[in-house]
Amino acid sequence: MQKRIDLNLLKYLERRRSMVDRALKRWIPGENEFPREVHKAMRYSLFAGGKRIRPILTLAAAEAVGGRAADVLPAACSLELIHTYSLIHDDLPAMDNDDLRRGKPTSHKIFGEALAILAGDALLTEAFHLLTRADLMKNVSPRRRLQATCQIARAAGSLGMVGGQVMDILSEGKEMERHLLEYIHSHKTGALITASVCAGAIAGGAAARQYKALNGYGEKLGLAFQIIDDLLDVQGDVSKLGKAVRKDNIQKKATYPALLGISSSHRLAESLVEEALACIESFNQRANPLREIAQFILKRTN
Amino acid sequence: MQKRIDLNLLKYLERRRSMVDRALKRWIPGENEFPREVHKAMRYSLFAGGKRIRPILTLAAAEAVGGRAADVLPAACSLELIHTYSLIHDDLPAMDNDDLRRGKPTSHKIFGEALAILAGDALLTEAFHLLTRADLMKNVSPRRRLQATCQIARAAGSLGMVGGQVMDILSEGKEMERHLLEYIHSHKTGALITASVCAGAIAGGAAARQYKALNGYGEKLGLAFQIIDDLLDVQGDVSKLGKAVRKDNIQKKATYPALLGISSSHRLAESLVEEALACIESFNQRANPLREIAQFILKRTN
């Protein structure tokens, strides 16, 4: 039975991923648009095999409150653009100095540092373009679009994702206390995952109580997601992950396994997923994809 | 008479600059907000003595169509945030590798490359936060706010400012044809100046015809502004400009004086300003600040 659910979920995730990919291909400037170099760099990272977890959460959250996935698709795509820009900038020599991402050379390895920085800048900017274009999201009220955009901007900025990356960089090689580790994780990864859920909820037409429940779900899920990421980095297999494994340990980066050990970290992720599920307990079956995604996160291998 | 007008304009610009500065100080996270390092870096570049031309144009354009400056102040500030982020990233070692900006060490010289990249990212993101916050711009309709935000995002992205910077970097040291030089200037500098005017027009409540006229004004002005910038770089004095003079020539960068000569470049800037003025000829005296700013740009010395 468990296996059958997983198979259906995998099919669901695959359908959603291809829906997001088609939309991104349509809405992002083509490789032949001038200047071609930057559009090539933007698309190189954007179509490097991402799982599209963030946009899929946006679509699922909109549906959980009775909205339509197609209506919020640009908002969903904007979160993938922001996620992709953050990976390009994180990989830069001045930051984590990574040569490999999703099994492929990182942006600056292919296009050089200047283009990688600019492709990241352009992806971030394009996210806000998608969120505000007059020809898109016509079934979402301007007020709700502004609200969703504001949430995303706040989650991505210096009080959110960028703040998490700043502390990750600054604490490298230092002794790490748990509250700082929690800050880094909840901001660097958690904030954008929470915003993915919240943006979908707002754009999908959530009432205040639904919004609050989904916000809680998103927060728990974001933290669980990062803990599993840390665990995969310790236990994972380079061929599956497509990036350098155990790099975090070598660079003495803050991770949950390093602080709590492997089995405690896994138990923590499990209990966070249970708390996430509890947040949306009162939702009807439209929230089932959100429920299944939360459980799936514990089992992911890449 | 001419001198008196200039004196009044200088007072006007000074008042507006301090209005923008006060707003930026109020709305941007304080230096004591966590993580302090990134907020310090953001504020370091933001309050390094910028002239605030872009936000002042936004305020003046809103007033030219009968809007109130105070109502569009967050949109005005967002343009300064985007301008500042672009300077930080342009100065990076991987880009123009500049040590000095407005007479002070550049961001990466003070905070290191990683923090400079992240402070730039955060400023860009904060621009879209300011444009969409529910507690700001309450007198501008959500629809107009979305429109203004979309214009700004388009102007700042890969089809606008970032595209211009990409071609500037890629064409360094190469023979430059005039159409490419025009592309670089109209995108790298022009697009954001035009968007500053357009965002003010939209948020200030412009009718379609007013918007079209101001868009034309903004385009001509943006190009004139960059030509004067090039001329100042050739003729200027390092103590006034606070940056390395003649650097563009040393790096064989594309400039109008290099292509057309100094006096032809100046004549071109003059005729562009005349064309800008012609675009807003039918406007009443509320557009006088826009008229005076256009004339002032020809005379600026820094």
Image: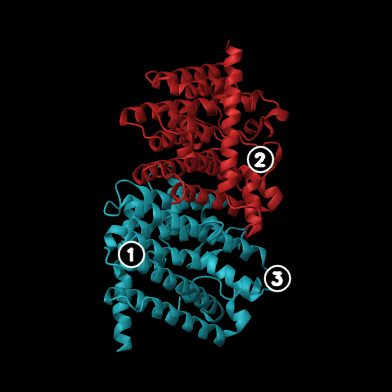
Chain colours: A cyan, B red
Query: Label 2 amino acid?
Result: Ala
Q: Is residue A100 above or below residue B178?
A: below
| CB within 8 Å, label 1 to label 2 | no
Seen from the viewer's position, the closer of residues A123 and B130 is: B130
Q: Position of residue A34 (x, y in %)?
A: 41, 42
Q: Position of residue A198 (x, y in %)?
A: 40, 64
| Kind of element beneath mark 3 | loop
Whole-Å distance between the Cαs marked 1 and 3? Answer: 44 Å
Whole-Å distance between the Cαs marked 1 and 2? Answer: 44 Å
Residue at mark 1: chain? A
- Residue, disc 1: A207
Residue at x 34% of width, y 61% of height: A21
Q: Which is more N-terminal, label 3 or label 1?
A: 3
- Residue, disc 2: B48
Residue at x 38% of width, y 36% of height: B202
Residue B240 relative to residue B5: left or right: right
Query: Label 3 amino acid?
Result: Lys
Disc ID at residue B160: none
Picture quadrant of residue B283? top left
Seen from the viewer's position, the closer of residues B288 and B102 is: B288
Q: Is residue A178 above or below residue A41?
A: below
Whole-Å distance between the Cαs marked 3 and 2? Answer: 32 Å
| Kind of element beneath mark 1 | loop
| Kind of element beneath mark 2 | loop
Residues packed near mark 1 inside 10 Å, few (<14), some (14 to 19) or many (20 plus): few
Residue at mark 2: chain? B
- Residue, disc 3: A174
Total numbered labels placed on residues in the image = 3
